Image (spheres, helix red, strand yellow):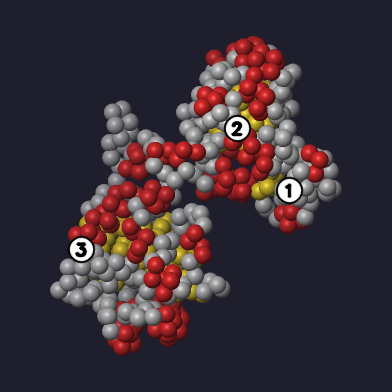
Amino acid sequence: MDKNRDMKVCIVQPFYSTNYDDSDKLFKWEMDALDKCDESMDIIVFPEACDVPALTKNKEQADSSRERYTDALVRKARITAKRCNSVVFINAGYDAGNGTRNTTYAIDREGNIVGLYFKQHPTNGEVFNRKLDCDYSYEYEEPTIVEIDGIRYAFLTCYDFYFYEAYAHIARKRPDFIIGCSHQRSDTHSALEIMSRFLAYNTNAFVLRASVSMDENSNIGGASMIVAPNGDVLLNMRSEVGMQCYTVNPSRKYYKPAGYGNPPSAHFEYIEKGRRPWKYRPGGSGIILPNSHLDYPRLCAHRGFNTIAPENSMPAYGAAVASGAMEIEFDIWETKDGEIVSCHDINLDRVSNGTGKIPDMTLQELRGFDFGKGFDGAYTGLKILTFEEILKHFACRTIMNIHVKTYGNDKPLDEEYLKKIINLIYKYDCQNYVYFMTGNDHVIPQLRRLAPEIEVCVGGGDDAWGIVDRAIKFGCTKVQLFKPYFNQEMIDKAHENGIRCNVFWSDDPQEANKFLDMGIDCILTNDYQRIATALEGRIKGNKLNKEAGIL
């Protein structure tokens, strides 16, 4: 579907009763409302808990409502979507196998359920009284985006609207619409309007909010509305019972002046450029400056702090980061079942008690091997790490030099695999804290095209002496020199062209000092603490180490 096309949005606002005995009557109203929808409507939005249409006093009443209404409601919504050639959003219970979840169903024009959004902030009543399944809400999760016909939908449900810190998280996903299936029965119309306008303005998306009327004369609850990306309220039903439509064009975003000399941008883009997360976000003291702001020269803990713990392991990475390493380096491979793991060698013999090659095995098979070799058995039982586990523990707490391993330098990598790597980086909001390293001249342009905002560091590959010229050719801003295949002339030429120079590697203090004298920007080392101590005062991070009492 063309985003420039006008779309007619229908918002449905039923009456809500505090008398449980009204449930059948109210549910029939909802079913009749679905029947009244027609082919002129492109998007249809119903409020929260359509399968619990009246106030319930306990878990038993809520469960009884869902037993009677949920299946019929979802079935009717699917029929309506297909009959009207519309996208329908309806909220009801969903059996996730561990109990019922508060769920918004996304139904496409063919009547297929193409997405589920689980309320991210269940209320205390849902957790403790209704005993809904809420385990998922205690884990990190990306904003849910459902794409239908090229249109991107994000979601908030009722209580979710109050957690403004989530707005920036959603905005990064660049939705066209935010679907708000809601109740919010205690807020005034003006308060609900403020929240919805704030949401639209901060996400550059249309907010489609459907709620329930408490009473046609009430000034609380209700306020089903449509708000444009610039914050204009296009429709507000206040406490009116019924359904109303408004035509919008999803391509009509709002771009504002972004400061002198800067092109217009969405509000969230303007804000992100100046964000200082360490000032207020949880764990802020552990968040370092992003790669673009962090000073040189630096040390990079090669495969983690691997002189005190097995390479490419959580203890090695953790020790490096805790010791103040501003960068860590690690290698990634794709397993037989499409998982991404961290290991330097393609063969298992040297790094584990297994044999064979990583690409020939599934993650489960690899987890069966012991990667804690050496160190007198102190690390016996270590399992191979996934790329996501590294991101989960160290995102924004160190710069990551990610060596994308290939089985030679003569062919590109599967782009779906590369997209999976990139998507994980964005999932953990880590795009400003990583850069890729590869010596494969087929993979370099792939990465530059798929993620142009993430730096690529050119490795030696099959032409170590030509590494600077290759970086210039590909428009890369980093090279990873491999001793002894470099000289002063190469370093100078790199710097003249705005290219930073890593060197692989040095564990010798005298040699490391010599590299800094030559102008090397980042030294990879296996013995982080020893080299950091020897280069005290010359590398970024020593000031932090000294203040922490590490040096």
Amino acid tagged 3: His
Task: Give 234 or 61, whichever is nearer the viewer.
Answer: 61
**Badge 3 or badge 2: first in the primary sequence:** 3
N-terminal of the two: label 2 or label 1?
2
Mark 2 nearby-residue class (10 Å; few <14, some 14–19, many ≥20): many
C-alpha separation, residue under disc 3 versus residue under disc 2: 53 Å
- The residue under the point 41% across, 40% down is 277
Q: Is residue 179 visible?
A: no
- Outermost residue, front direction? 549
Left or right? Give the position of 210 relative to 389. left
Residue 310 can be seen, yes or no: yes
Amino acid of disc 1: Leu
Left or right: 435 in relation to 192: right
Provide the residue designation for mark 1.
382
Instruction: Write down the residue under mark 2.
Output: 323
Q: Nearer the viewer, mark 3 or mark 1?
A: 1
Provide the residue designation for mark 3. Answer: 189
Disc 2 element: loop
Q: Position of residue 135 (x, y in %)?
A: 51, 65
Q: What amino acid type is highlighted by mark number 2?
A: Ser
